[in-house]
Image (cartoon, grey):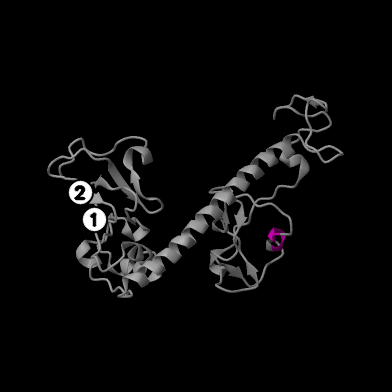
Amino acid sequence: NITNKKLLVFSITNVKGFVLQDEYFSHNIHSKKTTNYKIFRENYFGYNPARINVGSIALSEKQREGLLSPMYVIFKTKSTLNPKYLKYFIQTSHFKNNVINNVAGSVRESLNYSSLEMFDFSYPISISEQNRNAEILETVDETIEKTDAIIEKYKRIKQGLMQELLTRGIDENGKIRSEETHKFKDSPLGRIPEKWEIVKVKDIGEIEGGYAFKSDSFLLNGEYQVIKIGNLYKGILDLKKNLTYLNTLNEQEEKYTLKHLEILITLTGTI
């Protein structure tokens, strides 16, 4: 940007690709002087050499022209290659493994362009075949986006419904109670049906802490799986990761076996 063109400044993220800095970070973080910034255009690729290992590489598909800070590398494909075809190749495990095997630096790993341009890359010579492949994958992406939007919509509906059901409940006719037709009372949690009670968790269940199993007894396979904090994430109990087992349990340890319909809460981390 030697001529100091007044263009919008972007960053590249591993989730959203090219993003406006002032929108993504809520304020400008770039220098006032941008003559050393790089100009990218539509169908240019950009990546952060120090963050490409976590996916910070993207294709500019909508922005006709913009600026990236000097830390970024930008490049474009030759006319013999559809850039969208390369965009999808970048998402493959083959490309990601190449990145992992070629990043350099003991403190902050990075991938310079001279290393990137030596990556092996297979593609059909026919532009029409490249276009067809890219169009198919774009259609899949669009379907995923629409499906995700529907899922998010129903999550919001569920959240609202839970709020109604767990604070108002339903009457004998299966309808959510209303203060216009039912009696409510004040409570520390807000207005609740008159016949409801406010209790503490300790009054409706038994609370038991976990057990510090001896790590020197842990096995990669065994009869009993040991559940760790890492097995719980956003309300999901995932028993397929952090696999740790015990072959036997003593009398004390047997008291800490997880039973059906018991609730787990982590002391640290996520619930």
Predominant SS of the magenta segment: helix
Please state the total of marks drawn on the protein image: 2
114 in magenta = no
Magenta residues span 254-258
Identify the mark nearer the N-term, 2 or 1.
2
Would residue 154 be found to the left or right of residue 130 on screen? right
In the rendered view, tell whether residue 248 sits above or below residue 51. Answer: below
Q: Quadrant of residue 94?
A: bottom left
Which percent across, then down, holds residue 49? 26, 57
- Local packing at callout 2 (Cα closer than 10 Å; few below 14, some 14-19, many 20+) is some
Residue at (28% x, 38% y) in the render? 29
Would residue 163 be found to the left or right of residue 49 on screen? right
256 in magenta = yes
Residue at (35% x, 66% y) in the render? 85
- Mark 1 lies on a secondary structure that is strand
Q: Which mark is residue 74?
A: 1
Is the residue under label 1 in contact with that under label 2 (CB below 8 Å)?
Answer: yes
Report which residue position mark 2 lands on: 38
Query: Label 2 to label 1, Cα distance in Å?
Result: 8 Å
Which percent across, then down, holds residue 208? 69, 50
